[in-house]
Image (cartoon, helix red, strand yellow):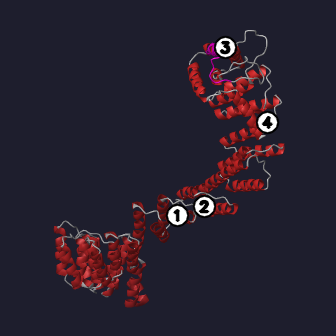
Amino acid sequence: MASSLSALHSTAASHLARSRCRRTAANARASSLLRLPLGRRSRWVAAEFATGGAGGTATGGGGGRARRGVGIDVAAVAAALRDARTADDVESLVNAFLNDDSGGEARLLPLQVYTCVIRGLGKDNRPDAAFAVVEHLKRRGAALNQFVYNCLLGAVKSSGEFGRIQAVLDDMEAQGVSPNIVTFNTLMSIYVQQGRVEDVLRVYADVQERGLVPTAATYSTVMSAYKKAGDAFAAIEFFVMLRGGYRNGELVVGSRGDWEQEFVKFEKLTVQACYLSMRRSLVEGKNPVGQVLKVLLAMDEAGVRPERSDYERLVWACTGEEHYAIGKELYQRIREGGDGGEISLSVCNHLIWLMGKAKKWWAALEIYEDLLDKGPKPNNLSHELIMSHFNILLDAAKRRGIWRWGVRLLNRMQEKGLKPGSKEWNAVLLACSRASEASAAVDIFKKMVEEGLKPDVVSYGALLSALDKGKLYDEALKVWEHMCKVGIKPNLYAYTILVSIYIGKGNHAMVDAVLHDMLSKRIEPTVVTFNAIISACVRNNSSGNAFEWFHRMKMRGIEPNEITYQMLIEALVQDGKPRLAYEMYMKACNQGLQLPAKSYDTVLEACIGMYGFFGYRIAR
């Protein structure tokens, strides 16, 4: 069948221009011809034909007679017929070409000319003219065949007027022309364009029932339908079936090399169908990881081998936190592909970002380490992404006071060629402060200076806080003096720690001096400042002073918060004043503050210890 179609195409081609250089001239004449009215155009073409002036020619029989030895300019014929709407329009133009002065005998151009014209009209989006040509052939009694109707169906496909498909099929049946495999291939390709996958499969089943021999185009169209539907498993199953049939000699083989090339196309279509299916699962699926892994495993079992670029495109579709497992699997497949190509750096950066989004920071670090060891060389974005992940980990260490973990993170960064900045060192210093590790804070501060970094006010504040919590007040004051000496201007946080240091030393007069110094520098004390003072009083068992500072805070118009009342209640209980502590607790609750359960337990235990349970109820 394929060879007969090839022969038919060869015959049609023999009636076309025998030289490509003449075709250019014919197209130029056709372009100028299109600007003429239909009547003048017909006379112009007739004159050209009569003088034998056509460039591209078609000669011979095939359903009609033409002047012996005179060529036919097919491009000019198509140009003349492009505005035809009825068989009468076609009739007048054809008669002009044939120079029909006898008027009696039915004359036609060679049938191969008509088929070429029909195809050209379809590509030029002139389906009405193509149908008019077929009606003209029917009126003149030409023997229509499968080739004519296949060209008409192709014209419908090219023009996109799919509503006329059934009219073509009905006309074929009325003319007694049976559809061949080319007809069904064209019909299936139209359904693929429309996304009518079920109709494609129905037509393919009809092909098999009729006993027609599918061509490579048939199989490609079915694969395209599965691709359009994103049905990965059906595409894989169909590909495996085709491959098995080919290996068993069940497919009609013309040239083995040609079929090998076709199977390369089939495999690519299968990969594309699987890609669309997996991408759709990642975007819309309820269980994207499971669905994508199933497709990947099915491809492995079928021996379908995606290229590195296919995996990389799929990586870009991984954007959700739950996609990290798929991203990691795809990354391993790309690295282990062995195709000689290097993984894209942008893909690696995307995976580093994805792992960070999923809180898989060590997995992100592994990818970064692979960039250093295996390539490609990381760029600025790679550094920024991995630094942001380290900062997240350091921030967690800071909040929890896990300073040793922070030190290990700094060491790991330096091992990988990443230079921690002040932000990273400050995070570890703040972790030491939260953990009350004064000696560790001093060591880290010194190492920071040794690394060539200049400590800022946050660095000094963290060191002061650690020394304050370690009750190393004299050392803390020396640090303060050094900070001022090197030109670091203290902020509210630093001043807050300083007043806490003086409270710890029992020097309340200096606390007033610090507050005045703050006001002189336009740094207003806040509730945080007074909370630090009250908290320091509680730590140093100076509950009376804590209560005094509470009143001074209110005199300044600063409203206490939950921490203020929590510290004050603890101070009053230390001072043996459970009833007053209870009153403060109720006052805070009446103000709408949510005190922690610890404050309630402290008041309850103090009252029961002082009055006993029943006495506590009477005291209330």
Marks 2 and 3, how far apart in space?
70 Å
Q: Is residue 213 left or right of residue 599?
A: right
Residue 150, visible in the rendered structure: no
Disc 2 marks which residue?
A: 288
Residue at the (75%, 33%) spot, across then down? 8
Q: Nearer the viewer, residue 335 or 514?
A: 335
Disc 1 marks which residue?
A: 321
Q: Nearer the viewer, residue 99 or 467?
A: 99
Residue 50's disc is 3
Among numbered discs 3 and 4, the one appearing first in the sequence: 3
Disc 4 marks which residue?
A: 179
Among numbered discs 2 and 1, the one appearing first in the sequence: 2
Among numbered discs 1 and 4, the one appearing first in the sequence: 4
The amino acid type found where label 1 is placed reads: Glu
Q: Which residues are magenta?
A: 41-57
The amino acid type found where label 3 is placed reads: Ala
- Please, what secondary structure does the residue beneath circle 1 have? helix
Q: Position of residue 257 (x, y in %)?
A: 70, 49
The mark closer to the camera, 2 or 3, is 3
Categorize mark 3 by other alpha carbons within 10 Å: few (<14), some (14-19), many (20+): some
The mark closer to the camera, 1 or 3, is 3
Marks 3 and 4, how far apart in space?
38 Å
